Image (cartoon, helix red, strand yellow):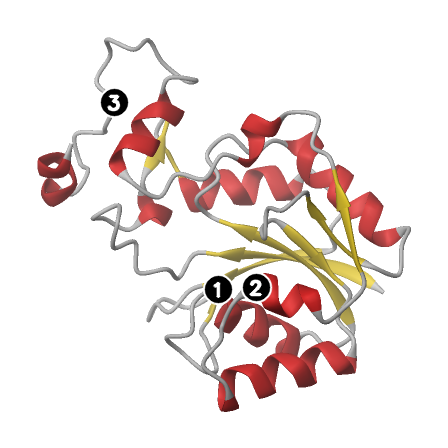
Amino acid sequence: MNTIAVILAGGASTRMGVDKALLKIQNQTMIDRALQLLEQTSVSQVVISRNDSSSGYIPDLIPHKGPLSGIHSAAMRFPNDNLLIIPVDLPLLNYSTIQTLIDQGNSSDNNVRYGKHNLPLFLHNSPLLRLKLDYTLRFTNCFSVNRLCSHFPLTEIKAKRQSSLFNANSPDEWRFAMQHFQPIDSPIFNEDSHESFKQKV
């Protein structure tokens, strides 16, 4: 089976105060940055899970259920492909971390993730996985990616650079991540960032 990369970029970003997918690192949005990284890997295709009226995105079939909604929609749309799930809010993610996950997933029958990090995640897109996803979203109130993983064989591997898995969900976490790209006394946010985001920091 081929592997399709799915960028999860449809979150509400309530803690950040602005759409995380459109935040910029060195004049490149987080979506574009993720696309550029993934295009260097061995995935056969890259798609974006996002509830947006713009064309080219995969909307949630069952909305408002968090990351599981995006995973479900991608699994249903590409039943013959395995899935590499990448959240858009990992500003320090690098090629090596992604490709290692792909290689481990392709060489194993198990789903694969880094330690206890729910995402990024390599999923073997089996009929049972799709059934479990659909049932969970339609008939339960638990939309946890970790809970989904617990129902299938899972391999946990160790990242060479733990910082590559740093998740930026708040202004303080974003500020910390940006120190890796520019001097600490430089302006952290782009001038076109959302005004409400500036007020929060």
Quarter in which the N terminus is drawn: bottom right
Residue topped by disc 3: 188
Residue topped by disc 1: 67
Position of 76 compared to 41: left or right?
A: left
Residue topped by disc 2: 145
What percent of the width, then of the height, locates residue 156?
A: 75, 46
Q: Name the kind of residue labelled 3 in the image.
A: Ile
Q: Secondary structure at mark 2?
A: helix
Q: Name the kind of residue labelled 2 in the image.
A: Val
Residue occupying image coordinates x 19% and y 38%: 193
Residue occupying image coordinates x 39% and y 38%: 168
Image height check: is 114 above or below 74? above
Q: CA distance from mark 1 to mark 2?
A: 7 Å
Image height check: is 97 above or below 78? above
Q: Secondary structure at mark 3?
A: loop
Identify the mark nearer the N-term, 1 or 2: 1
